[in-house]
Image (cartoon, grey):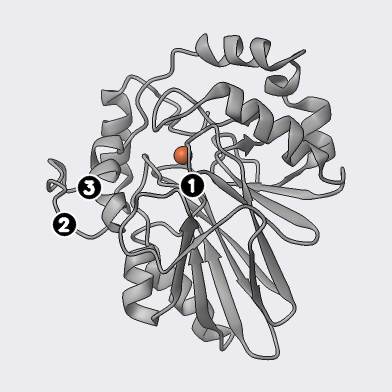
Amino acid sequence: MIFTQYFDQASSSYSYLIGSRPTGMAAIIDPVQGHENDYLNCLSQHDLKLAFALDTHTHTDHVTAMGALRDRTACITVMSEYSKAHGVSRRVKDKEIIEFDDIKIIALYTPGHTNESLSYLMTDRVFTGDTLLIGGTGRTDFQYGNSYAQYDSLFNKLLTLPDETLVYPAHDYHGNTVSTIGAERANNPRLKVADAEQYAALMASLNLPNPILADVALPLNPSYGQRTGNYPVPKQNFDYQNQASATTHSKHHGDSEQKGEGQ
Ligand SMILES: [Fe+2]
């Protein structure tokens, strides 16, 4: 298996490319607009064809690259059956399997951060989106978030996986790249709660700032990052490669650590 982790510095987002043999098919999870050439260069270097682009949920802090990748590679785009995004080729249900070569990616419905959030499970690893982060969990205060649903997704779904299962989240704000289910169970402070009531109270007390790029990403992501449909053109013309812009925007929200939607 070919496995590459990508980091978008402006939104502290992770994307993951998974390739396989013998057919040379590949999938990418949570791709970020502006990095398409990086992904396509990697695919080319390994003689891979992008078969699937999967989003764990509709992001608020960056624009998805799924639409651009679909246009450039004719890949199948995948989201939850509950997603409101336009142009999704395949809307998957809980436990539905995306399969190519010897790769099996099982969609797990893990609502709470949003009402459409999926995690994607492989044999030895799980891509947790903004449901379970390394040392944290995704915020539940907008996008139809629900702390009780997230408690259920965390404790009754993700934490039932074997301890050694690798955890690859959609964000990290502290330089972590990977964890395990066992390490999160042991060390994640958000998981040190007695019950769903205590978890909901903890999440309600966070008082988080708006995610950076929310006013750019939210109008664009339902149309897969393309300025089509009935969504307004965003006010900012944001340059993902321009860190000065990112810093300015972050300060606008009064958050020097550039924390965003996945807290
Ligand atoms: Fe998110």
- Mark 2 or mark 1: name the one nearer the start of the chain: 1
Placement of the N terminus among the 4 image quadrants: bottom right
**At 40% from the left edge and 24% from the top edge, which residue is drawn?**
256
Q: Position of residue 254 (x, y in %)?
A: 33, 19
Tell me the CA gap for discs 2 and 1.
26 Å
**At 32% from the left edge and 54% from the top edge, which residue is drawn?**
241
Which residue is nearer to you in this view: 178 or 126? 126
Tell me the CA gap for discs 3 and 2.
20 Å
Task: Determine whether the residue tagged by mark 1 lies in a helix, strand or loop.
Answer: strand
Q: Is residue 253 above or below residue 110?
A: above
Q: Left or right: 235 with respect to 160?
A: left
The label nearer to you, 3 versus 2, is 2
Q: Quadrant of residue 225?
A: bottom left
Residue at the disc numbered 3 = 238
Q: Left or right: 252 with respect to 138?
A: left
Residue 135 can be seen in this image? no
The answer to whether the residue labelled 1 contacts the one labelled 3, judged by CB atoms less than 8 Å apart, is no
Q: Is residue 81 above or below residue 102?
A: above
**At 64% from the left edge and 90% from the top edge, which residue is drawn?**
23
Residue at the disc numbered 2 = 229
Q: Quadrant of residue 72?
A: bottom left
Q: Position of residue 98 (x, y in %)?
A: 62, 69
Q: Quadrant of residue 208?
A: top left
- Please, what is the three-letter code of the amino acid marked with disc 2? Gly
Say few, some or many: other residues with alpha carbon within 10 Å of mark 2 (under 14 / 14 to 19 / 20 or more).
few
Residue at the disc numbered 1 = 13
Which residue is nearer to you in this view: 147 or 62? 147
Task: Determine whether the residue tagged by mark 3 lies in a helix, strand or loop.
Answer: loop
Task: Determine whether the residue tagged by mark 2 lies in a helix, strand or loop.
Answer: loop
The count of marks equals: 3
The yes-or-no answer for disc 3 within 8 Å of ligand 1 is no
Tell me the CA gap for discs 1 and 3.
16 Å
